[in-house]
Image (tube, grey):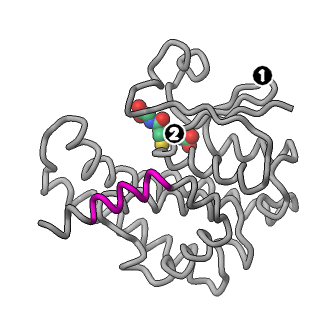
Amino acid sequence: MSLKLYCDLMSQPSRALYILLKSIKCDFEVKFVNLREAEHYSEEFSEINRFQRVPVIDHNGFILTESVAILKYLSRENIIPESLYPKESKAQARVEEFLEWQHAGLRLHCAMYFRVKYLNPIMFGKPVDAKSLVGYESRMVSALTDFNTKWLGRGTDFINGNTPTVADLLAACELEQPRMSGYDPCENFANIAVWFKKVREHFNPYYGEGHVIVNKIIKKNSKVASKV
Ligand SMILES: N[C@@H](CCC(=O)N[C@@H](CS)C(=O)NCC(=O)O)C(=O)O
């Protein structure tokens, strides 16, 4: 069996797949695609993914993009254990209910806040437009409020019950992103804070390994902020 994961650890769904495959002790090859160096626009990578995005897998020559499709495929191929991606119809539907929701319900808003507040000023050398940031922040807070009360806060340790699934890992990796731009969801949302700790603990040491670069940026930016 040959499984390659094309990823960049600055990318949320890339981290989720990287941590997942490491934590289930899957024998896979990591192919880093450095987004900051624009490696995803190279001819070589464009042939692998015509959309020029990560993550991508190559499983015995079968190339697949889109993190949710990849998770579903790896579950069907029995690479992800049932404990993390249920096979039973209704339990599986509950996990997939979250996987469908999170793209527009959570990821979009956390990623946009990160992009507008942190990435765009670095990429385009322009300061953040404070007015538009207010809108991005309020949409992110609204998404986090939904996540905090409608997915968490239902009397279970994780999104769907008392054991984690791929839904928890995908969500946690998304929620790390705004932390790099100085917004820590744990400071404002009690259910998220309790849940986040459990997800990190469950997937460690791989969770920490997948977030080494992210944590360095968070540390660096918090030092800068404390000096301001
Ligand atoms: N819906 C895709 C999203 C893929 C995606 O947007 N990847 C980002 C990193 S998180 C990327 O490759 N961005 C490169 C770019 O926008 O130029 C998935 O879930 O896999």
User: Callout 2: few (<14), some (14-19), or many (20+) C-alpha neighbours within 10 Å?
Assistant: many
Residue 8 disc label: 2
Task: Give the residue displayed 54% in from the left and 63% down from the top.
Answer: 172
Q: Is residue 157 left or right of residue 142?
A: right
Please state the horizontal and vertical placement of residue 71, each as a whole percent of the image: 71, 46
In this view of the protein, which residue sits in the foreground, 83 or 72? Answer: 83
- Callout 2: SS: loop
Look at the magenta stretch and give its main secondary structure. Answer: helix
Q: In which quadrant is the C terminus drawn? A: bottom left
- Callout 1: SS: loop
Q: Is residue 74 left or right of residue 213?
A: right
Q: Which residue is mark 1?
A: 61
Q: In which quadrant is the N terminus drawn? A: top right
The answer to which quarter of the image holds residue 123 is: top left
The answer to which quarter of the image holds residue 84 is: bottom right
Please state the horizontal and vertical placement of residue 208, each as a whole percent of the image: 56, 61
User: Callout 1: few (<14), some (14-19), or many (20+) C-alpha neighbours within 10 Å?
Assistant: few
Q: Is mark 2 within 8 Å of ligand 1?
A: yes
Boundaries of the magenta span: 212-222
Q: Amino acid at mark 2?
A: Asp
Please state the horizontal and vertical placement of residue 116, each as a whole percent of the image: 26, 48
